[in-house]
Amino acid sequence: MSEPVSTASSFPTQMPNAYLSGALAPTQDEIARSDLPVVGKLPQDLNGMWVRNGPNPMFPPAPHYHWFDGDGMLHGVRIEDGKASYLNRFVRTSSWKKQQQSGRNHSPSYVNARPLEHLQTLAQGARKGGADFFNKANTSLVWHHGKLFALWEAGSPYEIRPEDLGTVGPDNFFGKQQHAVTAHPKIDPVTGELLFFGNSLRGNSVRYGILDRAGRLVHQTTIPVGRIVMMHDFAITRRYTIFFDFPMLVRPLMPLVGGAMLRYRAERGARIGILPRYGSGDQVRWLDIEPGFLFHVLNAWENDDTLTLYACRFPGAPGVLNRRATSRDQLQLDASMYRWVIDVKSGRVVEGAVDDRPAEFPRVDDALVGAQSRYGYAASFLSNDAPALVKYDLIANTSQRHEFAPSQLAGEGIFVPRPNQVSEDDGYLVSMVHDEADDRSEFVILDCRRFDDDPVIARIPMPQRVPAGFHGVWIDGRSSSSA
């Protein structure tokens, strides 16, 4: 592979920091391997490429490193004609290049910043062109208008070549108006539009925009929020875009005096904001809901004047935002699947948990984003419950769990429909699983139609450890081959 990475040979894989140990411990090598061994049999109708993003510091970070701070690393598994291959690469951001040149890690921590470090970050950002100078591109990916983008919610998307995961460079969906872009844009499968927003640390607002299916910016507006909150995800239906104002307050200057940048304040209340898809920001309608917090949305849809929304809700501050976690028990992802039903005319909201078992990283069939769906999928990940991939039946209000060994961590499961699928769950759930007992990783393929009856039909042992990461995308073989 081109552009060999220079790393410190003494980089430890185990450190007294919960975000740098076990399944979260980083890997430094970039490799490419073909014709991987397979346990079971790869489905003949499964052709494409799974790519996942996640934080992975290139050089030893400061002791107060937080999981969200790592450099973006992409892992790809390509399945084609019954064979599998693997490759991984760092995203070549400006921050990555700066560290590569100096041979050391000098990235700031955004969750656990120190006063001097934060002051230097603000000064450098002002000199170098803003926060995008520190963009990690380490959170998620999106495939739109024939291009693959690595995303980080505090900066611009980075275009990635799907054939070798090489970095093309930054792209700004807002055109000339430099602005952060959410890590969780939504693609309307009917119109082909990509909807997104960007948090702003100034003006107590977010910027909202829409690209058409060809990648042209066709709408943008500013939505007043009234305070700066951590808004990580949002939802869409065919006519509406839905925002979340939860009381996870962002205080940009607090690290200068040793305080936390993020603070959960339940007494400040929570709201859901409803905006017509092409509405102006002042048309947003805010409705009060129970305080809590969410990272990720499963799906939302409308029936006449009723909106139904599913997401993984935390009752308070997530353990994974713990600034000083030294053990796994301190960084639990203890969200559970939750439902909000909204009467658009009256503004009445009925809400409640689907069940009380941990669930995070929710996914739905991408062809049903913004439309009524019966099935959803999630992971029991970094929780006190058994590690598992979960299938929800949103009509029957039931769930099925495929559990893994206690030493294993199953990441986000991505639904891949079979060609000519005959039912909503006619497809595969693909995920990366890491086993801390032997420090090995494997790519697993589950049959979604037999979730409660030994659904794993194939496992692909990885040629190197793949650390636990965040979000990925499946690029259909017809799309990736033409890219």
Image: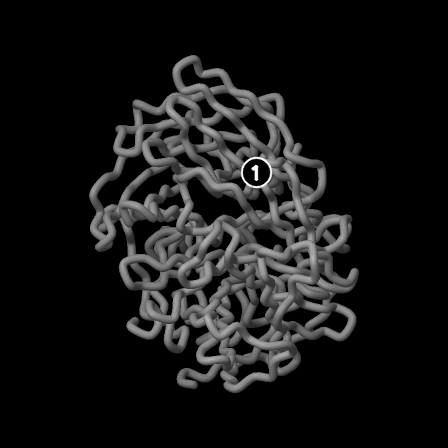
Tell me if mark 1 has few (under 14), some (14-19) or many (20+) residues whose alpha carbon lies within 10 angstroms of its own.
Answer: some
Q: Residue at x 56, y 66 (%)?
A: 56
Residue at far front of view: 422
Q: Looking at the image, which is closer to me, 391 or 468? A: 391
> Residue 180: x, y in percent?
37, 48
Color theme of the render: one colour
Answer above or below: position of 434 versus 245. Answer: below
Looking at the rendered structure, the number of numbered marks drawn on it comes to 1
Q: Quadrant of the C terminus?
A: bottom left
Q: Residue at x 72, y 69 (%)?
A: 435
Query: Is residue 96 visible in this depiction of the protein?
Result: yes
Residue at far top of view: 346
> Residue 270: x, y in percent?
54, 25
Q: Residue at x 64, y 31 (%)?
A: 353
The secondary structure type at the circle numbered 1 is loop
Q: Quadrant of the N terminus?
A: bottom left
Q: Looking at the image, which is closer to me, 395 or 357? A: 395
Answer above or below: position of 349 versus 141. Answer: above
Q: Residue at x 47, y 57 (%)?
A: 140
> Residue 227: x, y in percent?
46, 28
Query: Is residue 179 visible in this depiction of the protein?
Result: no
Q: Looking at the image, which is closer to me, 396 or 155? A: 396
> Residue 306: x, y in percent?
43, 24
Is residue 253 found left or right of 477 in the rendered image?
A: right
Is residue 89 found left or right of 326 in the rendered image?
A: left
> The disc labelled 1 sits on which kind of residue?
Leu
Residue 148 falls in image quadrant = bottom left
Residue 21 falls in image quadrant = bottom right
Is residue 470 found left or right of 379 in the rendered image?
A: left
Q: Looking at the image, which is closer to me, 235 or 53? A: 235
| Residue designated by label 1 | 394
